[in-house]
Amino acid sequence: MADVENSIELNDAIFCSQHFKEVCNECDVDFREENDGFFGGLEAPASSTTKDGTYQCKKHGSASCSQCYGWKKQITRARVAAKKAGGKKH
């Protein structure tokens, strides 16, 4: 269940405002539906707010940073890692 009051938006994806997670058990929120069911458990990198209240990545200082907020890249890396882990059967 989504609690929009405790959420932030980072590059078109919604996360819990306290832990920057799409699915956060501590805050009891699940924003996968709001994110079109596409992402599934992403964690946002460390972020800060600008004077106008926009979130930006701390590493590059950008609200639309493709390196930090590149969700497609994170998903691709996670899939590759899962395939590698699945292929290592003992």
Image (cartoon, grey):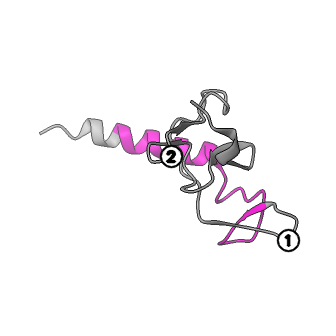
Asked if residue 30 lies in the magenta stretch, the reply is: no
In depth, the one of 73 and 59 nearer the eye is 59
Please name which of the two marks, 2 or 1, marks the residue nearer to the observer: 2
Disc nearer the start of the sequence (2/1)? 2
Marks 1 and 2: in contact by CB < 8 Å? no
Callout 1: helix, strand or loop? loop
Q: Position of residue 26 (x, y in %)?
A: 45, 48
Callout 2: helix, strand or loop? loop
Residue 51's mark? 1
Residue found at x 75% / y 71%: 61
Amino acid carrying mark 1 in the image? Lys
Residue found at x 69% / y 39%: 4
| Pointer 1 local density, CA inside 10 Å: few below 14, some 14–19, many at least 20 | few
Q: Is residue 34 left or right of residue 52?
A: left
| Pointer 2 local density, CA inside 10 Å: few below 14, some 14–19, many at least 20 | some
Residue 29's mark? none
**Which residues lie in the magenta part?**
55-83
Residue found at x 56% / y 43%: 22
Q: Is residue 75 left or right of residue 13?
A: left
Q: Residue furthest left?
A: 90
Q: Position of residue 30 (x, y in %)?
A: 55, 35
Amino acid carrying mark 2 in the image? Cys
Q: Residue furthest right?
A: 52
Residue annotated with mark 2? 27
